[in-house]
Image: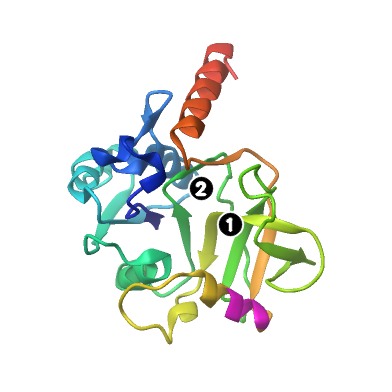
Amino acid sequence: MILAAGRGERMRPLTDTTPKPLLKVAGKALIEYHIEALVRAGVSHLVVNHAHLGEQLVDFLGDGGRWGVSIVFSAEPDGALETGGGIYRALPLLGGGPFWVVNGDVWTDYPFASVSMSADTLAHLVMVNNPPHHPQGDFLLDHARLRSNGVGARLTFSGIGLYRPELFAACPDGAFPLAPLLRQAMAGGKVSGEHYAGRWLDIGTPQRLQDLDKALRGRDAAGV
């Protein structure tokens, strides 16, 4: 699942007329980088949620055929449902097994390799080094398990996670955040994690979008 329903307030005025996942870097929409990476990892079925200017996403992505993947959409009300509520609304489209979720407003070269989760693990989160705008981090990674409390260096949640539907079993329909669910599961030792040290960027401001565009164009020009 690619999360694409956010309003993108920090990216205004760019997002007044374009959904954030459709903003382009190096001539390609942000969401296309995710689709291509997921297809390379063997994903054949994608769910994309949308709210703000969602018809643009539907028109641009279509059925996913040009990327060799099947895309279906989970429409949300104009105010969106937050991350937890958006995933919960899309559960009937995601099947009964573990599924990837990735924020549509990050860029990364994470390979989406197969992750093995034990039967009692409800979520597996990809953690990254703390960026300058989030130096305090989010969670502690301790022997491949994540904790929300305790002493130690914290890492930042990348917005990439593998989830079991059971994580959302007791949730109501409607808007709610994901973080409290994750913290509750962490308290029970049911969330694993990994530290990814590759390239990752939260595209939260027009300046970061511009910096990424410049970096990728420079890489392409150098043939990297």
Where residue 194 sits in the image (x, y, percent)?
Answer: 69, 58
Residue 79 vertical position relative to residue 67 in the rendered view, above or below: below
The foreground one among 171 and 42 is: 171
> Amino acid type of disc 2?
Ala
Disc 1/disc 2 C-alpha distance (Å): 8 Å
Q: Are marks 1 and 2 in contact (CB under 8 Å)?
A: yes
> Amino acid type of disc 1?
Ser
Residue 60 seen in render: yes
Q: Which mark is residue 75?
A: none
What residue range appears in magenta? Answer: 183-187
What secondary structure is the magenta-colored segment mainly?
helix
Return the residue at label 1. 114
Nearer the N terminus, badge 1 or badge 2? 2
Q: Could you say whether the residue bearing mark 2 is in a helix, strand or loop?
A: loop
Q: Residue at x 46, y 38 (%)?
A: 205
Return the residue at label 2. 41
Residue 74 vertical position relative to residue 22 in the rendered view, above or below: below
Q: Could you say whether the residue bearing mark 1 is in a helix, strand or loop?
A: loop
The foreground one among 96 and 8 is: 8
Left or right: 117 in relation to 79: right
Where residue 185 sits in the image (x, y, percent)?
Answer: 60, 79
Farthest-out residue, top? 221
Q: Residue at x 57, y 70 (%)?
A: 123
Location of residue 75 by image quarter: bottom left
Residue 184 within the segment the image draws in magenta? yes
Residue 186 vertical position relative to residue 5 in the rendered view, above or below: below
